[in-house]
Amino acid sequence: MKQASRRKFVFAAGATAGTAGLAAGLWRWYRAGHDAHAPHALPKPPVAPPTAADDAFPNALRLPGAAGLYGVVDHPRNLTLIAKPAAHEILPGKPARLLAYEAEANGRTFLNPVLRVRTGAAMRVKFWNALEETSIIHWHGLKVDSNNDGHPHYAVRGGATYDYQFTVANRAAMYWYHPHPHPLTGKQVYLGLAGLLIVEDEDDLALQKALDLRLGATDIPLVLQDRKLDANGAPVFAPSKDDRFHGHLGDQVLVNLTARPHFAAATRLYRFRILNGSNARVYRLGFRHGGKPLGYFVTGTDGGLLDKPYSVQDVFLSPGERVDALLDLRAAAAGDTLSLVSLGFDAMHLEGGKGAPHAAHGALADGAEIELLRIPVRSAVAYDRALPQSLSRIEPLATENATNRTLTLDEAKAVWRINGLTYDQKSTPIVVKRGTTELWEIRNVARSMPHPMHIHGVQFQVVARAGSPEQYRRIANAPRSLSPADLGWKDTVLVWPGETIRIAVDFTHPFMGDQVYMVHCHNLEHEDGGMMLNLKVAS
Ligand code: C2O
Ligand code: CU
Ligand code: CU
């Protein structure tokens, strides 16, 4: 009932934003964010009128523009990110209170800004915690020293600041930043704190040029976050005991904090750079054209470009992971309707125990089929770019002299564990020698859940999978039971129940002294529940 009336509201509300109660400043950033795309607008005619098909997805996808939510800050050198309550219309006409990172740059105000830098850039960021509880910013995927990593033991209390200063050593890719105070990460991310960090290098700029990829116009970041919203459209974080065990699922999926979004496209190539920013939900990403599956290309993963484009039908994306999907709309016609969907799959919650699919409290079940983004094709354009056959180089890590290590993921008394342990901020169960490569075998027991395992401070390569479930084996068409999205640099990898994954981790870095990072499950309720260990790289 509650659900039905909310839907009706979303459909009816359209674009009539109620301005009455809005503070002037707020309205300014809100509008600025929307006007910002005008200069990027694609050549339009011939234009198909909006169709009835868009009615179910009435809200224009929010895109990175020149200011406001997801506004792009280019080459930030001295930036202050303030974690604070902000107002944002997730449901049109209802400025809802959530949390966001606010920044000022070039006389403009940003919320959760997209930071765009080059490899090698020097960054200085001041984090100002304007929340009423501890927080810290973690740069997910970046190879920084532990002072700059945002490890929870650096969390600062409300009102305090933390200064970051580091060089971006990573390859071009879409990284992200989010809070990491223990055990408040899940709550703070859920309430809105998360932003993108786009790193560019020669290879990626070459691809952008070859395909005419422009951020916010034809190169589209998509942040997938399922949420439960209250009547004002504000996210409600109230996990039950069961949610804390399985992960907190929402009853709808927001894309770039837009409910029921559409993205109007033209007949050309687009790159969608997709982040699973959800606390717990896994997606199986596919496209549909007129109801039929439409293949696409995977061109990049967590740590950037693959060696070449791989043709796929679907890809699993677990919390924390990113994938670049190249979609070719040249065969479409103005008036066609496409969709980005999460295809149905077996979420494998407590597989061995015949656990019922997890769908507590009216949330969408994990593994349910969901239409995420409607893509109406509005205009036909001439576009004669060809997809390059080679994108970048991925040198396989040499593993002959690697140290072997095993991580076993299991559960006891409703607590998820790594090697039988849970987080203890004072102990460091994993010590690695700086400058070495390690081969880790991550084993998930059979009676378990899928765990997206993440390591701070490094990028790694997936070497092999064994014991994968059928739904994964179906797409594992690369050697050693890997799928295309396993073939790039990674910082997060999904380990299915019963599966054993081998990864090669490069612990080479230039930082003097011991560095303390961590390894954890990126299901944020599992992480906050303690499925997380300190990891020291000893110099
Ligand atoms: Cu994105 Cu320690 O996490
Ligand atoms: Cu991380
Ligand atoms: Cu987990």
Image: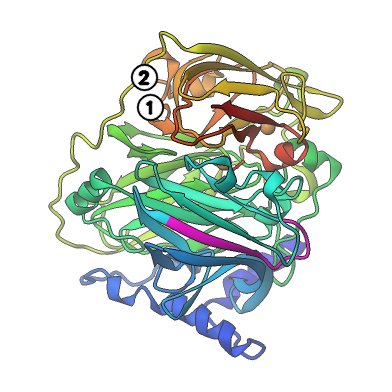
Q: How is the image coloured?
A: rainbow
Give the answer, above or below, for where 15 lies relative to 140: below
For label 2, being within 8 Å of ligand 3 is answered no
Image position of 189 (left or right of 56): right
Counting from the top left corner in percent of width and height, residue 100 is at 61, 65
Q: Which residues are magenta?
A: 123-134
Which element type, helix, strand or loop, lies under badge 1? Answer: loop
Asked whether residue 132 is drawn in magenta, I would say yes
Sooner in the amino-acid sequence: mark 2 or mark 1: 2
What amino acid type should be assigned to the residue bearing mark 1? Answer: Leu
Q: Which residue is mark 1?
A: 487
Q: CA distance from mark 2 to mark 1?
A: 8 Å
Q: Residues within 10 Å of mark 1 (few under 14, many from 20)?
A: many
* Secondary element at tag 2: loop
* Horizontal and vertical percent position of residue 206: 20, 48
Residues marked 2 and 1 touching at CB (< 8 Å): yes
Residue 389 lies in the magenta-colored region: no
Q: Residue at x 14, y 60 (%)?
A: 382
Q: Which residue is drawn at the image coordinates 68% and 51% (left, top)?
A: 250
Q: Is residue 61 visible?
A: no
Residue at 72 percent of width and 32 percent of height = 531
Near-viewer residue (19 or 534) = 534
Q: Which residue is mark 2?
A: 478
Residue that sits furthest to the front in the current view? 512
